[in-house]
Amino acid sequence: MLQVFKEEKLQSQFESQGYVKLKLFSPTQIEKLRTYYDKVQSEHEATLQSHALYSSVETGNADLLMAIDKLLKDTIMDQVKATFQNYQTLISNFLIKDSGDETELMPHQDLTFVNEPEHCSFNLWIPLQKTDRNSGQLRVFKGSHRISKTLRVVPDYPRPFLPYLDTIRELFTDIETEIGECVVINHSVLHGSSVNLTGQPRVAIIMGFCTEGADIHYHYMPEGDSSRIEKYLMKAEDYYHFNPDGRPKYAKQIDTISYCYEPVSEQTFQSWVKKEPHLDLLTKAKLLYFKSF
């Protein structure tokens, strides 16, 4: 895999833990992004139906998505270029978490964009306000991108870590952020977010990246049939245009594939726990000897 961070220490942390927290941006830059969101807030909130987390993509407005992309490139790309290398950009979004008692985002992985682990893809998560345990902070399961690989498709797929969700929640690392801080997170890392109890939406920017030279793919599984998953070759701009069913409107379908989804076995999970350097000995003992998976 190509090194995506210019600094070796950051690359090492990214590879071992699956995420890195950085202080990259100024309060002025964050305020500029927040001011723009306030102008388009009503269009985003129109997509809010029964779910507590929603994004710019769900507006279906390609012009808005392109405007967000331009805004980010005009505002923060100098810091991105100074920090990263060997990358190509995917799509940019506002990601909004509503406020309420039922707004916890459970452990999950993001979509598969590239052939893993030969290449990697990741998000730059930029909250536009401080985040903590009461305002929808990010939560990450360190090193979980190295447990097991699976093809992550739309609209849904059998989740390989489903038997361990409660355990994973206990092992989450909570990431508080100040204005200007951001989190770089591998798309295959298990992550979630805490409830937002502030009474106000938590707004973040999501910028997608993958390693330079990687083919970008999108996988669509119709009617839950894993024997006929549609594989599309994507360009970054293809993420602006989707059909109502979730298929890309303009990207070319290059294959129909079959994939065998299997849950992560208890043996695999326990083997990873034994080897994982980010878990202390007491935690390992509790997981391996006292906890029923």
Image (cartoon, rainbow, N blue to C red):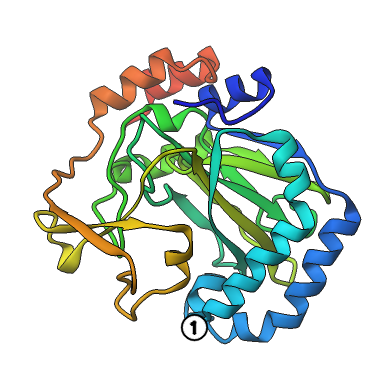
Report the quarter where the C terminus lies. Answer: top left
Which element is circle 1 on?
loop
Q: Is residue 52 visible?
A: no
Q: Is residue 252 visible?
A: yes
Left or right of residue 177: residue 186: left
> Residue 77's spot in the image, x, y percent?
73, 50
Which amino acid, mark 1?
Gln
Left or right of residue 290: residue 7: right
Report the quarter where the N terminus lies. Answer: top left
Q: How many numbered marks, from 0 up?
A: 1
Tell me if residue 233 comes above or below residue 168 in the rendering: below
Q: Residue drawn 29% across and 49% down? A: 159
> Residue 52's spot in the image, x, y percent?
54, 71
> Residue 218's spot in the image, x, y percent?
32, 56
Judging depth in this view, the residue of 8 and 159 nearest the camera is 8
| Res 238 → quadrant | bottom left
Residue holding disc 1: 49
Tell me if residue 59 comes above or below residue 287 in the rendering: below
> Residue 251's spot in the image, x, y percent?
32, 65
Q: Residue drawn 52% across and 22% down? A: 16
